[in-house]
Amino acid sequence: MHITFDTELDLQYVYKLLSNSKNQSLKLKMKDATLFIDVLKNDEECIRTYIIPALTQFVLKIKEPQYIRYFLSTMFFYEDETEQLQIIEMVQSLVSDDEERLHPSLKEGYPREEIIKRALSMFLTKQVQFSFEAFLTFRLKDYLLRLQEYIEVAIDEYKLEQDYQDFIETLRKYIACKTSHINLIHVVQEKERFIFYDEMFTELEVKVELEEEFVSNYGFEVDQELIAPLLLLSPASIHLYSANLDHGIVQTVVSIFQERVTIFPYERFLEKYPIDHT
């Protein structure tokens, strides 16, 4: 088997993978940009067990980031390197998820790794000689199409993240311009409901009239249960008690109010302030 690679680095990467397998049935030799593989015995088993996994890893670890950058610049017109890196991170996050956690729009179709292995198993034989770049172009079309699907989802996720960061920054600027008229507010999350208390743990009734202002001035809505009251009150300090510290809305409060917020587990509230809040 002779495999020609585009670069010496690609050749050395695959050579190292196969060498590390320490399989005595494989005899390896490098010359110029070509890897010569002599399968001494059990050729089908060696190809399936060692060569196909090594070439699959080479595609996923080395060639895939290159293809993502290529598609981003030529198909989706993301040429800024910083944006490319952020989207690549999104793609890597998507591909590292378990099948059960896979993005809904990606559940249809085969996993990338399986597509590559299938194509290799149908193509590789003991005597085959080929250019790996040509193999990628003509034999891995299904994989490249699948990769584009991941990129499209990653771009959507990237845009949503950008919108979220713009939203957070707008709210930070909003509270930076407001004067704090209250020193400390305690916020307790009771399931999906938030209850507000002043410093003396007297329950507050907060009238929210922020949505119309924000929609007209900034073009987006604000959560009326927690975010809007905090924006209106703009306290110097916020003590937030929650049974789910990773809850999305809790993390959003931290992102907006930053050092003003201290997060406590819900049990802390029950221990220190055993008031009737049912």
Image (cartoon, grey):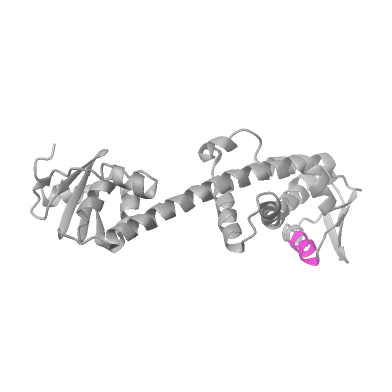
Residue in the foreground of this view, choosing between 13 and 208: 208
In the image, taking residue 14 as reference, residue 100 lies left or right, namely left
In the image, taking residue 230 as reference, residue 201 lies left or right, namely left
- The answer to whether residue 248 of the structure is visible from this angle is no
Q: Which residues are magenta?
A: 8-16
Which residue is rendered at x = 82% and y = 55% of the image? 26
Residue in the foreground of this view, choosing between 254 and 234: 234
Q: How many marks?
A: 0
- The answer to whether residue 49 of the structure is visible from this angle is yes
* x and y, in percent, of residue 24 in the image: 80, 56
247, above or below 35, in the image: above
Q: Is residue 245 magenta?
A: no
In the image, taking residue 86 as reference, residue 68 lies left or right, namely right
Q: Is residue 13 magenta?
A: yes
Which residue is rendered at x = 7% and y = 54% of the image? 200
* x and y, in percent, of residue 117 in the image: 74, 43
193, above or below 60, in the image: above
Which residue is rendered at x = 10% and y = 50% of the image? 201
The chief SS type of the magenta part is helix
If the image is split into quadrants, where does the C terminus sit? top left
Q: Residue furthest top?
A: 108
Residue in the foreground of this view, choosing between 6 and 172: 172
* x and y, in percent, of residue 138 in the image: 83, 44
101, above or below 60, in the image: above
* x and y, in percent, of residue 54 in the image: 73, 53
Residue in the foreground of this view, choosing between 22 and 150: 150
Which residue is rendered at x = 67% and y = 56% of the image? 69
